[in-house]
Amino acid sequence: MSAISIPVAAAPAIATEHLTRRFGDLTAVQEVNLRVAPGQFFGFLGPNGAGKSTTIKMLTGLLAPSSGRMQILGSDFTENPVEVKRQIGVVPEGMALFGRLTGSEYLNFVGRMYGLDRDTAAKRSAELLEFMQLTDQPKSLVTDYSHGMQKKLALAAAVIHGPKVLFLDEPFEGVDAVASNTLKAMLQSMIARGATIFLTSHVLEIVERLCSHVAIIHRGQLVAQGSLEELRAGVAAQSATALLASGAAPGDQPASGEKLTLEQIFLRIVGGTRRPDQELSWLG
Amino acid sequence: MARLDFSPSMREQFAAIGRVRWQLFVNSLRTVRGRLELVARIFMFLGFGMLGLGGSVGLGLASWYFASHGQPEFLALLFWLIFLFWQFFPVLASAFSENIDSSNLLRFPLTFRSYFLVRLAFGSLEPATAIGILWSLGIVLGITVAAPSLFFVAALSLLAFAILNILLGRMVYVWVERWLAQRRTRELLGVIFFLFIISFQLINPLILHFGKRAGPAMSHFSAQALPLQRFLPPGLAADSIASALHGDFLRSLGAVLLQCFYSAIILGLLKIRLRAQYQGENLSEAVARTAKPAARGAAPTVGWNIPGVPGPISAVVEKEFHYLSRSGPMLFTFIMPVVVLVIFRFGSARTGDPGGILARAADLAFPVGAAYTLLMLTNLVYNTFGGDGVGVQFFFLAPLRFREIVLGKNLAHAIIIAIEILLVWLGTCFLYRPPSAEIVAATLTGVTFGLLVNLAAGNLLSLYTPKKIDYGTFGRQRASGTTAIASLAIQAVAIGLCALALIAARASGRIWVATLLFLFLIVLAAVGYILVLNQVDSIALKRREALITELSRA
């Protein structure tokens, strides 16, 4: 399907040009042109294997692009990797924790690696542990934390230096409802203060609730990008055109005023509808 | 005991497991690193093969001698040797053993019988079993040559002995695995293991030290203990053959049956553990909820400040120290150089004999201790990211050049070695006599040269052949096979150069010649180290995907 693209007026916090990554013969990400404005809560969606994690790894320096350019806050990533990394915070796929440190030691370590002085790192570590409700077991090693606690610690580490751009790969996976609310509140307050957040998640309800803008990647290509309203309008227009072309009756078109959910938009864009003959007859 | 009933589905499950393991092996050959690992394993296989065949010939000759010269009671010595090797080698060389993660199997509809047999089969596919069986076959052959009529008795006895060893090894392993699953028991066992190793190494020096005075007491103890050993598996195996040689076949059969009885008990204990695993036991390490929370408003813990060292590098050094200080196996490694000095001192203190290499030439104690320190600690530098696991991703996310991270790690390791060398010097002064200034200078320059060579090579190998290791478990700190072989070659070259410098000093009769030569070598090594360090950023960037993938493996 053709990409639905809406230009972003402001100077981008994240911009990619023809970003491509190949693994041998497989092109995992192809010619992706992303633009995320400062202050946006941006959702990056796609089916499994679409290229989301590959893109986020390239944007954070964990993976080299095969070709194309990336700019974060106006700086070219390849030319100024250290400068760019200083401005961003990341919760990567594997969380990148050091299991044999305590939570406090880990946050102190991360803070100092981002250039904070010892006292500031220690102060922020204590505040973050308190905020994330991770003070119950101060002597526990990170390896002994539950998955949800590790996720909270990873997020705390990603924000300890006050990044201007935050990349989050599935941040709510395995986090309980209470902690999830805390995290969402924190992220929204960061947005209110002008930070940019780039989020991938398979939970579309969360993305719909949090994100103002969304991009959808499918089979390595960017197939949609814009605000939720713009995507809705784009999908509705495409559906109408398709219906007219097929000569369907006007009644088959989406009802006027119907508000598509992000899940519906997503399924229509990536073609996630299942063929009726795709039945597994042997399943009980 | 589970019935050995091979239903068609069980056979298919076994075939599927075998196929998937084969496929994993074949897939590992897709990468250069995988192929290098294969080459390293072939070398190791050759090494173990020589050990197995050589030992088999030696034990065969010994058993032939004992059986044909009317001394069958000495066969117990051979069986004890095999027994101890079989049981302890997998603990001391776990890098050569492969243990499957049973939790992966549990999601499949495996019966307990299948699960039990799979665990037993895969646990038995290790060098210790192969070598143990080869050695046992050597004994069977030796006895058969000495007394052909005893072939069946020897074969039966050795079969029972082999089965018992296989079961015992698995049983001990699964129980130790159970205890090591929790940090507290891990630490406790680490201390016990350490004390055991120390006491094991001290036995001989203590006997030598107290030899004459303790003679009667030792004789009395031996007289009491020797009959008891006959009721233990190695003694029983020897007894069954010795009895048959003396024509007492009933006693011979009794000894075999007693071995079978022991095997049944071991099997029962093994079954208890495997049953618990089969039922999906969860050995969570989560700390009890009663743990005391951090006091509100308490002063936050501030990180280390190393004078003259930038904050991020200090942070890396601090992180390394936290990691190593929480690792029982690494603490064990750190203390060994001093322990070696103590052992040599005890060994050399025989009454009326100034013996012992180090006591005869006390000036050697400091250089030997320092060289041993370097040798032990270089394990750290050849796989420097191995213990970081998935955390290695952070090093690529942090706003630092990779060389700064490597520099931090090198600095931490150099500090540890410096502290160790200081301890060795103190140990030398206390146990022997203070080494001369010339010896100290030659030793320190030699160690500096060795350290620089190892750091330079270690930085490269850490990036090219990383392997995830576990600092918390004994025997899980070994680097990849490729690294092991490469580091062996580098150590050989470094030691060779040091030896040449020492030979030159000896020939000239002046120790400072060695110091001068070492200083020259230090300059060369430092240039090499800086060249490598300058390349670290580009190598790390090129290797980042491989590094992250390898160290993030579950």
Image (cartoon, rainbow, N blue to C red):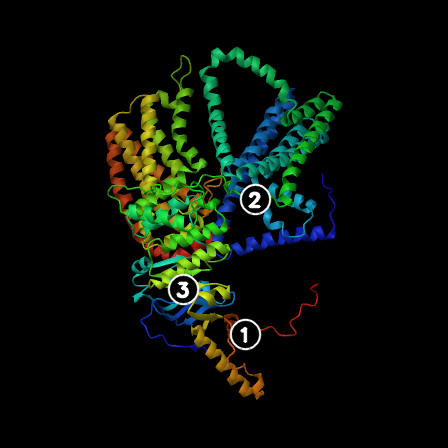
Q: Earlier in the sequence, mark 3 or mark 1?
A: 3
| Residue occupying the point 43% across, 47% down | A134
Numbered disc 2: what chain? B
Numbered disc 3: what chain? A
> As shown in the figure, which amino acid type bears the numbered disc 2?
Asn
Q: CA distance from mark 3 to mark 1?
A: 24 Å
Q: CA distance from mark 2 to mark 3?
A: 41 Å
Q: Which residue is mark 2?
A: B99
Q: Are marks 3 and 1 in contact (CB under 8 Å)?
A: no
Q: Residue B455 in the image: x percent, y percent?
A: 34, 44
Q: Which residue is mark 1?
A: A271
Q: Residue A38 in the image: x percent, y percent?
A: 34, 67
Along the line of sight, which residue is nearer the eye, B142 or B91? B91
Left-right relation of B21 to A229:
right
**Helix, strand or loop under label 1:** loop
> As shown in the figure, which amino acid type bears the numbered disc 1?
Gly
Left-right relation of B189 to B392:
right
| Residue B511, quarter of picture | top left
The disc placed on residue B411 is: none
